Amino acid sequence: MLGPKQVIYDSNYTTHPDYGGSLKGFTGSARADLIAGFERERAAAAEKISREIASLGFTTSPEDLAKSWWYPYRQPEPGDPGDLADLLRNGITAYQIDPALKSALLEISEPFLATIAEKRRQRTGRPHFPDNKVRVAMPTSDPEHRPLLRLLRNLFDEYQWDKRATQYFGSKSVKVSSAIFKVAGKADNAWDWECRGFDDKRPPTPARGLHFDAGGYFDMKIIFYLTETVDEKNGAFRYSLGTHLETPSLADMVTRNAIEVFCGATPRRQEQRRRFLSLPSDYRRRIDFGPDLRDGSEAMEALLGAEKVFRTDQADTVFFDTRGIHRGGFVDEGERSILQLTLRALN
């Protein structure tokens, strides 16, 4: 299994002499000012993350920031339900949900998906993320959302996902913090930089899209497929099994969150790339690091070798730890619609 240091090493650009091409970074006093600016951004990110974690009832200290994720994992034990054992061992588990509940979910999803379809019809120019989703903030008092809330309660009663999450985190409770309906089609694959890394002439990398979630300190997600058939051709979800056990330290996540603000989550513009390439190698780390991996590198081969594809002929719902390395597949045929729930632990 792949360790976090190898992932960081292979995605920090010291190993990529072919990346950047003729693009030159900042030098002299301009570089010194750039680094000072990033260190201020990093300090702000550390404070923000500490506040977010404290709001969930957990505490952090300067020592915590230097550690890996501090809540303890345990190995599966005799008597653990099968889905909990899968979560502890692999970071993910899957379900084929009851047909009646699935039918109700599809019916309730129709108006949300219709809203997305209209937004996509009005799209001009290249795609961008807001036009392929509808977010339902939780908790919600909107009367139009009541059928969705009732159905989610029935699903949680049936599959005990809230109980599994508290068992997994060792927390007192969990809450559903968001529900997002999403649609992806071939046009949404046009995020060229996210496919190719810094080399615009490079073919799309096999590791495109690999990431772990920026804010997943105590988060799990549930994804329901709303499309009848989902496989490798139309965006099946993928997860590198066991990588939830090997995520970087909290301090490393502070750096990666600061990079998203300082250089952009997907820095396509030349100026953003110059800023990124001018930082010291310890700071050149991204959350969406898949395109940065060298083709054929140990890191890429290990992550792809551990990856499992979740197709609808096996399961229509996945429940996973967001700190494990994962991606939504790229859509080459048709569209893929999902409902994504985020569960957040509370202490």
Image (cartoon, helix red, strand yellow):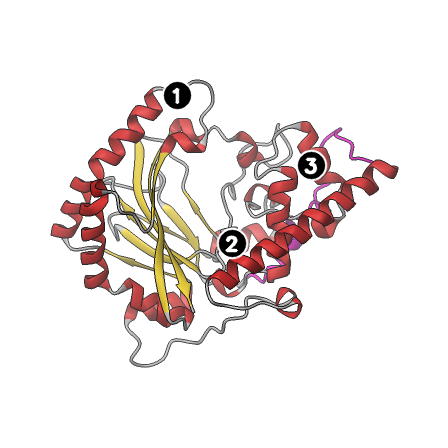
Q: Nearer the viewer, residue 266 or 172?
A: 172
Q: Residue at x 29, y 80 (%)?
A: 79
Considering the numbered disc 2 on the image, is that residue within a helix, a strand or a loop? helix
Numbered circle sitting on residue 19: 3
Distance of label 3 from label 1 (alpha carbons): 32 Å
The span picked out in magenta is 2-27
Q: Could you tell me the amino acid type at mark 1?
A: Arg
- Report the residue that reaches farthest toward the left: 100
Residue beneath disc 1: 123
Looking at the image, residue 104 sits to the left or right of residue 62; the answer is left
Q: Position of residue 20 (x, y in %)?
A: 71, 34
Q: Residue at x 57, y 36 (%)?
A: 266
Q: Is residue 300 above or below residue 21?
A: below
Lower position in the chain sequence, tag 3 or tag 1: 3
- Residues at marks 3 and 2, CA–CA distance in whole angstroms: 21 Å
Give the mark count: 3
Residue 345: image location, x then y, percent: 41, 63
Amino acid on which disc 3 is placed? Tyr
Residue at horizontal 36%, vertical 63%?
174
* Residue 251 in sight in this render: yes
Mark sitting earlier along the chain (2/1): 1
